[in-house]
Amino acid sequence: MRLFEVCLRDGLQNEAVVVPTEEKLALARALVGAGFKDIEVTSFVRPRWVPQLADAAEVVRELPDAPDVRFWALVPNAVGLDRAMETGLRHICTFMSSSETHNLKNVNRTIKESLAETRKVIAAAKSDGMSVRSYLSTSFGSPYEGAVDPARVESLALSLLEAGADEIALGDTTGMGHPAQVVTLVRRLVAAGIAKERIALHFHDTRGTALVNVWAAWQEGITTFDGSVSGVGGCPYAPGAAGNACTQDLIHLFERLDERQEPTPGMGPVTGVDLDRVGEIGVRLEEALGRPLPGRFHQYWKGHKQRRAQRSA
């Protein structure tokens, strides 16, 4: 099972507070120390669009030396790719939407225009030997149009893979997806010839279904899931979107896959990530943002920590 941590990018992009660069780097170091191997650290969008991530180049240049960790950044277009390349980054994420209206509001382009631009970005990145992950937002429903045609999601996913993307991340941007829908879409993409190893899933917990959607996809053989520490996150162009799937919730779920085996203290046998250390990161992130974070295990862990402190006092 592969966890793709997005708290530093998707988690921070919609926050009222701009987290200082040094604090972002401290969080990045902590995530590496907790055992994450894939961390999305920032976005090379125009600073005026997302001022919370205006320090993208500085963050990437100062990342810890961790050869076994893949640091990723979102790039919106060719200009963003150039900025990312200047930092020496080797792993990028492209993005577009499966919803015409959401795509227009998000990047001011039609789906057709975005696909053409994304193909160029992928080609340039691959020619430089970079890894490319392509997000398909609103794959399970649009906040503006409602249902999204699965045939469109399939067509776009195939087009992005044909363009050279290594992986497609299907985004449930406003948390509209449900388990039956997840199973149906995953099976459709696999039937279209897409390997399960090239499908990732990115759920939001708006309706409380993120964890059960992950479980449904896992049962279908999908092994890559996005998570955000303590469930922080949201989309500025998706009204009503709640936080991302909480990373601690995912780790807790997968640590207990084998009912015959007690969880390994401090290290999930499936995820390889230290749940206690992620709990500490969640507390630090909550303090940096100055507001309570929604993750369920995050809330439990804070209470458990307080009770332990009271007993030892």
Image (tube, grey):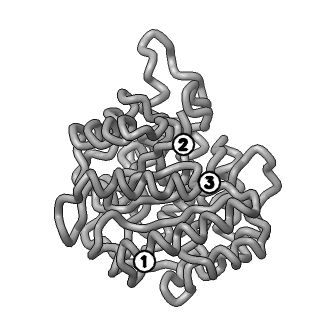
Residue lying at the far left in this picture: please name it. Answer: 146
Kind of residue sitting beneath label 2: Leu
Q: Secondary structure at mark 1?
A: helix
User: Which comes before the other along the chain, label 2 or label 3?
Assistant: 2
- Give, as a three-letter code, the residue at label 1: Glu
| Cα–Cα span, label 1 and label 3 | 29 Å
Neighbours of disc 2 within 10 Å: few (<14), some (14-19), many (20+): many
Residue 8 seen in the figure:
yes
Q: Which residue in the protein does label 3 denote?
A: 39
Residue 26, x across and y down, in percent = 69, 62
Identify the residue at image location x=29%, y=67%. 99
Residue at 30 percent across and 57 percent down: it is: 152
Q: Which residue is mark 2?
A: 3
| Residue 91 shown left or right of residue 186 in the figure | right
127 relative to 307 in the view: left or right: right
What whole-number distance in Å separates the C-alpha atoms at marks 2 and 3?
9 Å
Q: Which residue is mark 1?
A: 113
